[in-house]
Amino acid sequence: MPTYQTCRRHPEAGPFLAECYGCKRELFDIQARNEAEAAQRKTARAALTLIGTPTAEILSVNLTDTTLVVATRQPNAYLEYGVDVFRLPTTAETDPDLTDDYRLTPGQWLLIWQAGDHDRSAVTDMVRDAHTFLTESGLVAADDTELVAA
């Protein structure tokens, strides 16, 4: 007896294979994207916790190997919308031969730039300014990050 299935690719039920490869691939892609976004948000939440804003609503996250740009909303803050830029410490900054006063913790995000505004429409410009800052600082190549609109 044939197996029937209905999906976006097959709007009319009919005899098909038990599993549609296209649909399986689409579901896998959705799951992978959701897991990647969850990992980015977890990283962003850890960085925000370090600067004392653990409850801020995360609007967008742009993550590279060594930098992190997080757009947030905090309704009760002086500036409701903010963008924080973080970087990971370099190998030289985490050298065990440095004294404790100068040695940074490996893997711990460092806040290097911030912007804030009262208007949500300014968030996209602040994220763009953050990317410009990272590019001009030499921390990322001009095409190394993908700007995510908040």
Image (tube, helix red, strand yellow):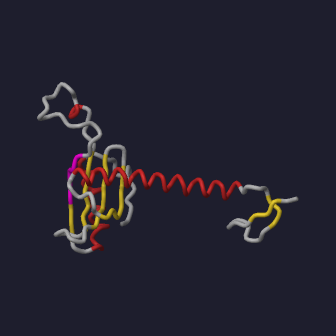
Identify the residue at image location x=34%, y=47%. Answer: 141
Identify the residue at image location x=33%, y=62%. Answer: 58
Q: Spot the residue most to the top.
A: 97
Question: From the viewer's perspective, is 77 left or right of 46?
Answer: left
Q: Quadrant of residue 38?
A: bottom left
Give the dominant element type of the magenta stretch: helix, strand or loop: strand
Residue 91 painted magenta: no
Q: Which residues are magenta?
A: 110-114
Q: Quadrant of residue 90?
A: top left
Question: From the viewer's perspective, is 98 left or right of 37?
Answer: left
Classify 104 as above or below 83.
above
Q: Position of residue 115 (x, y in %)?
A: 21, 62
Question: From the viewer's perspective, is 62 left or right of 85?
Answer: right
Identify the residue at image location x=66%, y=55%. Answer: 24
Identify the residue at image location x=23%, y=70%. Answer: 80
Q: Position of residue 96 (x, y in %)?
A: 21, 27
Q: Quadrant of the C terminus?
A: bottom left
Q: Quadrant of the N terminus?
A: bottom right
Looking at the picture, tell me which residue is in the foreground, 120 or 140. 120
Q: Position of residue 86 (x, y in %)?
A: 26, 50
Q: Position of residue 140 (x, y in %)?
A: 32, 47
How many numbered discs, if any? 0
Looking at the picture, tell me which residue is in the foreground, 133 or 31. 31
Classify 139 as above or below 127.
above
